[in-house]
Amino acid sequence: MSTATADRVVRRVAHVMGMPISLALRGRHAGDLDAQSAWAEAMAALKDVDRVFSTYRKDSFVSRLDRGALDVVDCPPEVAEVLALGERARRESVGAFDVRRSGRLDPSGVVKGWAVERAARPLRHHLDDTDFCLSAGGDMVCHVADPAREPWRIGIEDPHDPTRVVAVVPVREGAVATSGLAHRGGHVVDARTGRVPEALASVTVVAADLVTADIDATAAFALGAEGPGWLARRPGRTGVVVHADGAIQLVGE
Amino acid sequence: MVNSTMNRLSRNLTWLLSTLTVVVLLFGYKTSTGGGSLSAESSAVSSASTAPISGSSSTSSGSSGASSGSSGSSSSGSSGSSSSGSSSSAAKASSTVTGDVAQTRWGPVQVEVSVASGKVTEVQVVEYPSDNPRDAEINSYALPILIKETISAQSANIDMVSGATVTSGGYIQSLQSALDQAGV
């Protein structure tokens, strides 16, 4: 029952779907062939998701659905599942989050968290006594198998200076997602107004799963000045809000 | 799909007319995920934290790190645990020390530490907390710890960076990139 690997962190990086995927592993299988195999499986899962959901691929199910060449019932069941998540997000965010933009179907904002949760399955189920933190472009799923080990320490990037962090979140089980304009301008808009929100610089949400964390971070960010209050009313979430003026606010119980 | 286009939000509501078919189907499907609860798939995510404990040994820092867990994070809760008695025995050539029962948030934990030549060679958990998935779930993540002044990733001792969607293009200059390289 002992582990000789202690807390050595083994890391892997790949680029899938134009996004850096970073994996950190600790524990029994961190550096072995089982980890290699689970990592390959995780990447394959992401590529599968891309084939179904990419709005860049004209032959993806989502692209064909958008063109009206297919019905939802003709798609793999995952498409209906993701669209349902998008609908849930739209309702819960009072319309600030919407998977349809400019008349086009684009569920990417829901797909990402959902895809990373799926990609994390082989890590979770095939690597016993092994901790992982799987990040896709700054949004991540964390798991610590052994309570004797420390939680993962997740740094929250300073949106005004991406070389620095403003907070650290210790996470054993759960997900962390951040939404903001730090890396490119204007990719998040308030679906109700079509405008880029200006009140906030970034919103980070910690929740039980990445679908929830991602949706809530994006919705709270899009809601602008109303975002922190909205987030505070969401059950089971904690978070860090960085205001446009640099003020930092913790949200949660 | 995912990088600069991980566009999370949509720009307007005109989709209503153009995608009515999809919406109708959605409402039919939605019943299984309604009520704000997670889908079955998602909700399974946080229940896996009760795997058998097998103690992490740290060959350089003695036994204090073995059972106390999250030493650096004041709000993560496992500060009640401690192992005892091993530091003095570390000077001996080889010995095994059983620590006091430590109360952790998962329940009582007792750890046995083997020391050889002043270094921890093995950690065994003698007593395990009883399974309590609900507690584990509730305590699965902690409140963020604010840092008074922004600091570099290195001095914050962090494992990963969460930030607004990092693209592959921007990754090279990112903090996460630095962390990944340091670990390889």
Image (cartoon, coloured by chain):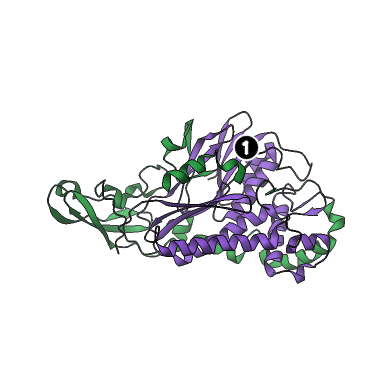
Q: Does residue A211 show up? A: yes
Q: Position of residue A183 (x, y in %)?
A: 63, 39
Is B11 above or below relative to A78?
above
- Residue at image location 58% in from the left, 30% down from the top: A247
Q: Position of residue B152 (x, y in %)?
A: 47, 34
Which residue is identified by label 1?
A: A182
Q: Horizontal placement of A241 versus A31: left or right?
A: right
Mark 1 Cα-neighbour bin, 10 Å: few <14, some 14–19, many ≥20: some
- What shade has chain B been given? green
- What shade has chain A been given? purple
Q: Position of residue B31 (x, y in %)?
A: 71, 66
Nearer the observer, B62 or B50: B62
Mark 1 belongs to which subunit? A
Q: Horizontal placement of A9 versus B36: left or right?
A: left
Q: Does residue A174 show up? A: no
Is A213 above or below relative to B48?
above
Q: Position of residue B17 (x, y in %)?
A: 87, 56
- Residue at image location 30% in from the left, 52% down from the top: B67
- Residue at image location 68% in from the left, 52% down from the top: A109
Task: Give the quarter of the image for residue B27.
Answer: bottom right
Taking the view exactly as shown, the residue that stands out farthest to the left is: B92
Give, as a three-letter code, the residue at label 1.
Answer: Ala
Task: Give the quarter of the image for residue A187.
Answer: top right
Q: How many marks?
A: 1
Per the image, label 1 sits on a secondary structure element best described as: loop
Is A60 above or below relative to B161?
below
